[in-house]
Image (cartoon, rainbow, N blue to C red):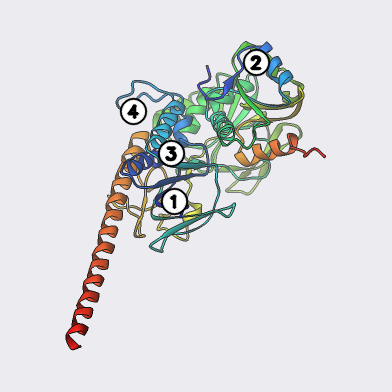
């Protein structure tokens, strides 16, 4: 029964690692299965200055400490795996990986986190790193003296567009709606910047180039007209998506694909809890993820204890009944 | 300063020594940013897992002037996104990628360019 655990955690971001620390410290055999980088979105944060008890630390270092802490309590971590199938409904839950390995557990914590949203159009992947970027701080300086496009209409898109004017000669914001979702101050700052212009109610339909990006086809969503825009680079800031695709036929999700949980982080399935950026909530912070991971782990520990007690009580009841039957049969003799 | 658990190449001559003394070398040249960290993470995991013992994994800070040895490679002339990840076999560049990569893509490259062939 090497592949059977008390608890399996899907995802090793702050929520999953915290759940791992609590569950393994409670002497429950715990396995974390993780598809991407350990630490999740946390490790991508350059500096974390609002994590209580730590004045300033890089997300990468904090993620590494959490991982070490979880391992020190005996938590097993398997990373960069791919989940092929899951059975969450049965009392003993199972997770099947793409390499065929099956792990089972009495309880599950789902903390698969989120990822930046891609446009998902032709050429996006081909020109990634050759004109298509998702990080202004990382790649902005490659576009010094060049003309670029920014896609999106939220705070990140508008703030990054303004910051990219430090390098680019012209920044064109392409947004699918006729108004912005960003805060008023960010919209105002972008509108007042002479280097920024706007293409509204439009979307990029294709990235075009040879060895690197040369232009994009932009479709006007109202008229259907396609306009070819020459550009050296495109920065995409269109929000985050929960990593819940693999759960859509299993767990109750909302319209945005976020996992629905109650105050104990319990999902609609008995013995399955969820925490972190993939659940339906308003605030997405390392501290909130850690708090949810804690609640999910404690609630799951309690569930496992109750299930064990119930099982023991049922077994005792059955033994007593059997003893009674034996006694009765003796009386008949 | 890169705060990864990989071996850092700080000088151009360290880079030259690394690719001269090791048959298969992967160097990730980036910053501590959102496109680079996942690549460092994957390299650390591959190193820990031990399935690529025939490959030496290093990182190098993109803004370190000494990393001109990577920034000036002809193979990266069209690159416009960090990290620049370079794969060397016997000191020669055999593959180079720009920006974030998945583990599948990285292991795909490692298996292709550093394939272990059984000696007859």
Disc 3 and disc 2 in contact, CB within 8 angstroms: no
Say whether mark 4 and mark 2 are on the same chain.
no
Residue A169 lies, in percent from the top left, at 61, 21
Residue B45 lies, in percent from the top left, at 55, 34
Q: Residues within 10 Å of mark 2 (few under 14, many from 20)?
A: some
Query: Which quarter of the figure has residue A112?
Result: top left
Q: Which disc number belongs to residue A256?
A: 1
Give the residue number, with chain letter if any, for mark 4: A51
Q: Which disc number belongs to residue B67?
A: 2
Which chain is disc 3 placed on?
Answer: A
Disc 1 and disc 4 in contact, CB within 8 angstroms: no
Disc 2 and disc 4 in contact, CB within 8 angstroms: no
Viewer-side residue, A126 vs B62: B62
Viewer-side residue, A46 vs A24: A24
Q: Which residue does the image show at 17% across and 85% down from the upper left?
A: A331
Alpha carbons under labels 2 and 1: distance apart = 43 Å
Q: Which disc number belongs to residue A13?
A: 3
Disc 2 and disc 1 in contact, CB within 8 angstroms: no
Which chain is disc 4 placed on?
Answer: A
Q: Which quadrant is home to the C terminus of chain A?
A: bottom left
Query: Which quarter of the figure has residue B106?
Result: top right
Q: Which quadrant is home to the N terminus of chain A?
A: bottom left
């Amino acid at each position: 029964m090497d592949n059977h655990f008390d608890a399996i955690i899907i995802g090793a971001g702050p929520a999953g690692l915290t759940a791992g620390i609590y569950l393994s410290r409670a002497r429950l055999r715990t396995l974390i299965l993780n598809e991407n980088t350990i630490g999740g979105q946390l490790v991508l944060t350059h500096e974390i200055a609002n994590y209580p008890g730590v004045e300033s630390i890089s997300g990468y270092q904090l993620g590494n400490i959490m991982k070490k802490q979880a391992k020190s309590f005996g938590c097993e971590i398997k990373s960069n795996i791919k989940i092929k199938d899951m059975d969450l409904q049965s009392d003993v839950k199972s997770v099947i990986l793409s390499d065929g390995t099956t792990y089972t557990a009495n309880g599950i914590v789902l903390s698969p986190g989120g990822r930046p949203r891609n446009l998902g159009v032709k050429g996006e992947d081909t020109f990634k790193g050759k004109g298509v970027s998702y990080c202004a701080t990382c790649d902005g300086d490659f576009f010094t003296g060049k003309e670029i496009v920014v896609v999106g209409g939220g705070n990140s898109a508008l703030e990054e567009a303004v910051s990219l004017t430090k390098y680019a000669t012209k920044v064109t914001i392409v947004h699918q709606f006729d108004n912005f979702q960003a805060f008023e101050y960010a919209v105002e700052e972008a509108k007042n910047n002479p280097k920024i212009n706007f293409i509204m109610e439009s979307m990029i339909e294709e990235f075009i180039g040879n060895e690197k990006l040369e232009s994009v086809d932009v479709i006007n969503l109202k008229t259907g007209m396609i306009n070819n825009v020459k550009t050296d680079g495109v920065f995409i800031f269109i929000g985050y998506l929960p990593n819940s695709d693999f759960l859509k036929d299993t767990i109750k999700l909302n319209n945005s694909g976020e996992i629905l949980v109650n105050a104990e982080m319990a999902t609609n399935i008995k013995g399955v809890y969820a925490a972190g950026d993939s659940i339906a909530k308003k605030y997405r912070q390392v501290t909130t993820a850690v708090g949810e991971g804690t609640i999910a782990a404690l609630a799951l520990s309690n569930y496992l204890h109750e299930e064990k007690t119930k099982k023991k009580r049922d077994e005792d009841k059955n033994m007593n009944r059997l003893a009674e039957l034996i006694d009765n049969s003796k009386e008949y003799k | 300063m890169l705060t990864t658990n990989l071996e850092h190449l700080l000088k151009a001559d360290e880079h030259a020594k690394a690719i001269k003394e090791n048959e298969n070398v992967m160097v990730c040249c980036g910053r501590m940013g959102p496109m680079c960290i996942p690549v460092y993470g994957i390299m650390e995991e591959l190193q820990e897992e031990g399935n690529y013992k025939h490959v030496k994994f290093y990182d190098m800070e993109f803004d370190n002037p000494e990393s001109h040895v990577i920034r000036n490679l002809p193979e990266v002339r069209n690159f416009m996104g960090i990290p620049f990840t370079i794969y060397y076999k016997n000191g020669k560049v055999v593959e180079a990628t720009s920006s974030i990569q998945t583990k599948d893509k990285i292991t795909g490259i490692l298996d292709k360019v550093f394939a272990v062939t059984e000696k007859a």
